Image (cartoon, rainbow, N blue to C red):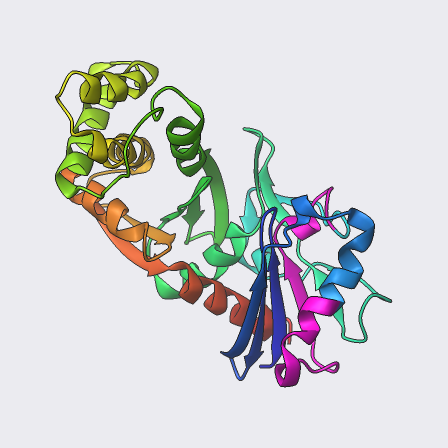
Amino acid sequence: MNYIAVDWGTSNFRALSVRDGVVIKSVQDSCGVGKCQRSALPEILKQQLHRLEDAYDEQIPVLLCGMIGSNIGIADAGYLDMPLSFSQLLGKGMELPDILPNPLTLRPGICDKRVNEICRGEEMQLAGALTLSDAATFAAVGTHSKWLKVERSQQQVTGMQTLMTGELYHLLLNHSVVGKGLPEQVHSPAAFQAGVETALSVVHEKVELVTELFRCRGRYILGALAQEEAASWLSGLLIGYEVACGHPGGDKTVCFIGSEMLLPRYQQACEVLHHRYELLAAEDAIIAGLNEVFSYGG
C-alpha cells in the first residue's frame, strides 16, 4: 500500500511517505495549526509535501489527521461518538477536493459525549495498537494522555478518559512557584519512585493531589529532596497518579503507547505499583494504524 500520511497538530507538522507499508521518507516542521492563519493552511500543506522530493507522488492518496481536522484546521471533520466499532475507527473521513492533485481525505476525531471527552490523533495510534496488542485498555501517553477502553467481543471502543499529565508537569515546572529558582534538573529514578509512592498515598489515603503538588517545593526547600531532582519527583507523582487512577489492576494489562523518553517512566510506575503493562512505540502504533486504514479502505 502506498500513501502519504500527515499528522498535523497544534504545534507541529509531520508528513510520512509510505510505500508497501513502510515509511521511506518523512519531513517535519514546527508549523503547527495553532501557529498558522487558517487561510494559509492549504498552501503550507503543498509546500511541506514537496519537501518529500522524490517521495512525493501526485497520484497517491494523502490522509490528514490531528488538529488539522478541528475547528481551527483546514476543515472541521467532526467527531465519531462512542461507543464506536473498530471498522468506524478505520474510516478515512471526509474528502477534500481542489486542494491537492492527490486524492485528499481528512480524518475525524473521536469523542464520548456522555462524559464530554474529545480526542484527535491518538485514535490512529489506537487503530494500530489493536493489531499489535491483546489488551483491552490502552494509554496513549504524553501532553494529554488518552486512556481508551475497548470491548473486543463487541469489536468496539467503549470509553475514554484524558489526564493532562504532561501539560500539568510543564506548567508547574515552568510557570508556577513549584519550579521557580530550581537549578538544572537531572533524572533520578529514586526520586521518581518516591513520587510514584506518594501518588499511591494520594489515591488510597485521600491526601489531596493539589496539596502534594505544592509539597514538591516544600520537600526541596526543607532538604527532603535534592533541588536538581525535583522534576523527577514531580514526574513520578503525576505519572504515578495517572497510572494508579487509570489502570484496572488485578491481572489486567494496559498497553502504553508513547515516546522512547516517556515509556520507561510509565514502566517504572507500573512496576512500583505492581501493575501489568505492555510498551508500544508511538511510531510503530501510528504506522500500523495507517496501514490498517488503507487496507480497510482498499
| Any part of residue 95 in sight | no
Q: Which residues are magenta?
A: 47-73
| Any part of residue 288 in sight | yes
Instruction: Place residue 47 in its image quadrant.
Output: bottom right
Q: Position of residue 138 (x, y in %)?
A: 38, 49
Q: Quadrant of the N terminus?
A: bottom right
Judging depth in this view, the residue of 7 and 162 nearest the camera is: 7
Q: Position of residue 73 (x, y in %)?
A: 73, 48
Q: Position of residue 267 (x, y in %)?
A: 23, 49
Whether residue 282 appears in magenta in the rendering, the answer is no
Whether residue 54 appears in magenta in the rendering, the answer is yes
Q: From this viewpoint, which residue is outermost toward the right?
A: 98
Q: Residue at x 34, y 35 (%)?
A: 246
Q: Residue at x 38, y 53 (%)?
A: 258
Q: Residue at x 25, y 14 (%)?
A: 206
**142 shown above or below 240:** below
**153 shown above or below 194:** below
Left or right: 155 in relation to 257: right
Total marks in image: 0
**66 shown above or below 18:** above
